[in-house]
Amino acid sequence: MASTSPARRAASDAAHHGHEHQAVVVNGVSSDDEPSVEWGWHGHYPKVANFAGFLVAAICLVMIWGNHVGQQENIWLVVIAVAFFALSLGSIIRARTSWRR
């Protein structure tokens, strides 16, 4: 017997009671705001986002070796790389320590 998600149960209950359109709310997310919540999927990919942040930081640092003459480009590339690295690292630290609070 397959289990159904809360969104599918709410949608099937609405269909059985003859309602035409009723918003489905799962974990505080309404199907009026996010249509994907109706069919049972609504999530984020924090590991992919952290990896992408580190990747962007690495690409910015690799772009330092280029054909530009001035140092202003290098400063911006390093600042952007440090910002992406800090945001990704901060996200990992917050995720690891969130259960302690």
Image (cartoon, grey):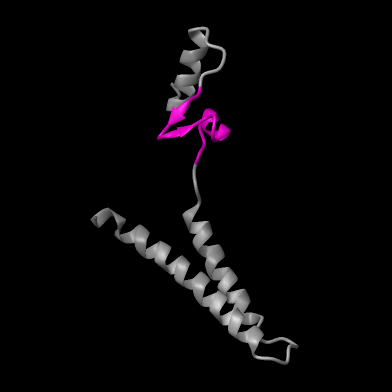
Which residue sits at x=52%, y=11%? 19
Above or below residue 96? Residue 54 is below
Above or below residue 82? Residue 88 is above
- Residue 71, image x, y percentages: 65, 90
Q: Residue furthest left?
A: 100
Quarter of the image holding residue 60? bottom right
Which residue sits at x=50%, y=51%? 45
Q: Is residue 18 left or right of residue 100?
A: right
Residue 31 colored in magenta in the image:
yes
Residue 90 colored in magenta in the image:
no
Quarter of the image holding residue 55? bottom right
Q: Residue furthest right?
A: 67
Q: In terms of depth relative to the viewer, which is nearer, 9 or 35?
A: 35
Above or below residue 89? Residue 32 is above
Q: Is residue 59 left or right of residue 30?
A: right
Q: Which residues are magenta?
A: 23-42
Quarter of the image holding residue 62? bottom right
Which residue sits at x=66%, y=84%? 73
- Residue 1, image x, y percentages: 43, 21
Above or below residue 68? Residue 96 is above
In the rendered image, the quadrant that contains the C terminus is: bottom left
- Residue 69, image x, y percentages: 73, 92
- Residue 32, image x, y percentages: 54, 29
* Marker count (numbered): 0
